[in-house]
């Protein structure tokens, strides 16, 4: 097997196991995109609060920035090498914190393989003991705490994001697709 890393200048360059496409990043622009701010209510999961609020605005796909707020029952994962070698990385076991303070995060709203809403989120937060941590937030189990989470939304009105298997990374990734008439 040919060493695919030999041409790279850095030792930590990640080389995925699948065939690489000549177009590395699929992209679309949205001339009609809307920008607005939300305040997520206490007690809701981040997933449900975002999906419900954005559905009321007619948004099915979005890029979001999360700023401040309290998190209760925070669930998160960290990336780790895939011991099987089938992928470069995978999510490790879930970690939890009873309470944390959100510092900053980025989230993406799209659709899973069945067409159901999915929220993918990475964030930095401060735990109750003051430790700053970060990771992939489990939005279906993490709840907004007493202080609401502020969200800056970039609605993607002219296309949708859908999860699909990526040949290069051998992982499911969100990709842009032209909207269908029934969306």
Image (tube, rainbow, N blue to C red):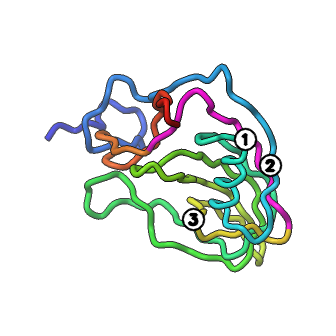
Q: CA distance from mark 2 to mark 3?
A: 20 Å
The numbered dot on residue 138 is 3
Decide: few, some or many residues near mark 3? Use Cα within 10 Å; few <14, some 14-19, many ≥20.
many
**For marks 2 and 3 on the same chain, the one whose residue lies earlier in the sequence:** 2
Stretch of the chain drawn in magenta: 147-162
- Location of residue 89 in the rendering, given as x and y in whole percent from the top left corner: 39, 55
> What secondary structure do most residues of the magenta stretch adopt?
strand
Q: Are marks 2 and 3 in contact (CB under 8 Å)?
A: no
The numbered dot on residue 23 is none
- Location of residue 174 in the rendering, given as x and y in whole percent from the top left corner: 46, 42
Residue on which disc 2 sits: 38
**Which quarter of the figure is the N terminus placed in?**
top left
Residue pictured at 27% horizontal, 44% vertical: 17
Which structural element holds mark 3? loop
Decide: few, some or many residues near mark 2? Use Cα within 10 Å; few <14, some 14-19, many ≥20.
some
Question: Quick one: which residue is furthest to the right in this view?
Answer: 147
Residue on which disc 1 sits: 153
Q: Are marks 1 and 2 in contact (CB under 8 Å)?
A: yes
**For marks 3 and 1 on the same chain, the one whose residue lies earlier in the sequence:** 3
Question: Quick one: which residue is furthest to the top in this view?
Answer: 31
Is residue 169 placed above or below 128 in the rendered structure? Answer: above
Q: CA distance from mark 3 to mark 1?
A: 19 Å
Residue 180 magenta-highlighted:
no
């Amino acid at each position: 097997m040919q060493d695919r890393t030999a041409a790279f200048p850095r030792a930590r360059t990640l080389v995925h196991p699948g065939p690489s496409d000549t177009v590395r990043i699929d992209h679309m622009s949205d001339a009609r995109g809307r920008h607005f701010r939300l305040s997520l209510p206490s007690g809701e999961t981040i997933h449900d609060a975002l999906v419900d609020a954005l559905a009321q605005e007619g948004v099915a796909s979005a890029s979001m920035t999360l700023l401040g707020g309290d998190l209760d029952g925070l669930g998160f994962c960290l990336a780790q090498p895939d011991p099987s070698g089938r992928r470069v990385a995978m999510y490790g076991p879930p970690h939890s914190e009873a309470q944390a303070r959100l510092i900053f995060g980025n989230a993406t709203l799209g659709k899973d393989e069945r067409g159901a809403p999915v929220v993918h989120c990475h964030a930095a937060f401060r735990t109750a003991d003051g430790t700053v941590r970060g990771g992939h937030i489990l939005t279906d189990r993490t709840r907004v705490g007493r202080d609401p989470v502020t969200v800056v939304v970039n609605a993607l009105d002219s296309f949708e994001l859908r999860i699909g298997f990526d040949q290069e990374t051998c992982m499911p990734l969100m990709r842009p697709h032209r909207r269908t008439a029934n969306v």
